[in-house]
Image: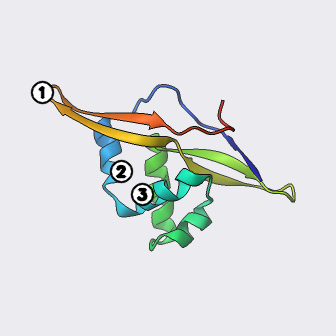
Amino acid sequence: MSSQVSNTRTDPTVSPAAQLDVLGDECARTILVATSNGPRTAKELTERTDCSSATVYRRINNLLESELLAECIRFEEDGSHTTAYEATVENLQVEIDADGIDVVLTQAQSDDRP
C-alpha cells in the first residue's frame, strides 16, 4: 500500500484564528491524531470517532481548508485506489504577544511528499 499527496502547499494561507477554531472541535482533533500515523479513509475515520459520517466529512473539509490535513490517493495491493487523508502538521505552537496570536506549524514529514 502506498499513498501520494495531491494537495500540499508550501506557504500557509490560513489565519491562525481559523486553525485554532478547527482544533476546538473534538472530532477534528480525533481525525488529526488518527491521520498523524498515515493516511486514513473517511470510512476509517468514521469508525475511529463517535461522530456520524456527515460530521466526519464536514470536519475533514474544515481541516483541509485550515491546511492541517491533506488529501491523498491510497493505492491498494489489488490495484484499486481510494481517497485518504493525512495530517500535514507534526507540531503546533501558539505564540501570544503584544502583536496578537500566531500559530507556528511544523510540517509532518512523509516519504511520499515532494
* Percent of width and height locating residue 57: 51, 60
Which residue lies most toward the left here? 98
- Left or right: 53 with respect to 93? right
Q: Which residue is mark 1?
A: 98
Q: Which residue is mark 2?
A: 22
Q: Estimate how packed mark 2 is, as few (under 14), some (14 to 19) or many (20 or more) residues with alpha carbons within 10 Å.
A: some
The kind of secondary structure element at disc 1 is loop
Q: Residue at x 52, y 69 (%)?
A: 48
Residue 29 sits above or below residue 106 on the image: below
Which amino acid, by three-letter code, is at mark 2? Val
Which amino acid, by three-letter code, is at mark 3? Ala
Q: How many marks?
A: 3
Q: CA distance from mark 3 to mark 2?
A: 7 Å
Numbered tag placed on residue 28 in the rendering: 3
Which label's residue is closer to the chain start, 1 or 2?
2
Q: Estimate how packed mark 1 is, as few (under 14), some (14 to 19) or many (20 or more) residues with alpha carbons within 10 Å.
A: few
Discs 3, 2 touching: Cβ within 8 Å: yes
The kind of secondary structure element at disc 3 is helix
- Looking at the rendered image, the quarter that the C terminus falls into is top right
Discs 1, 3 touching: Cβ within 8 Å: no
* Percent of width and height locating residue 45: 55, 64
Q: CA distance from mark 1 to mark 2?
A: 24 Å
The kind of secondary structure element at disc 2 is helix
Which label's residue is closer to the chain start, 1 or 3?
3
Which residue lies most toward the right here? 78
Which amino acid, by three-letter code, is at mark 1? Ala
* Percent of width and height locating residue 85: 59, 51
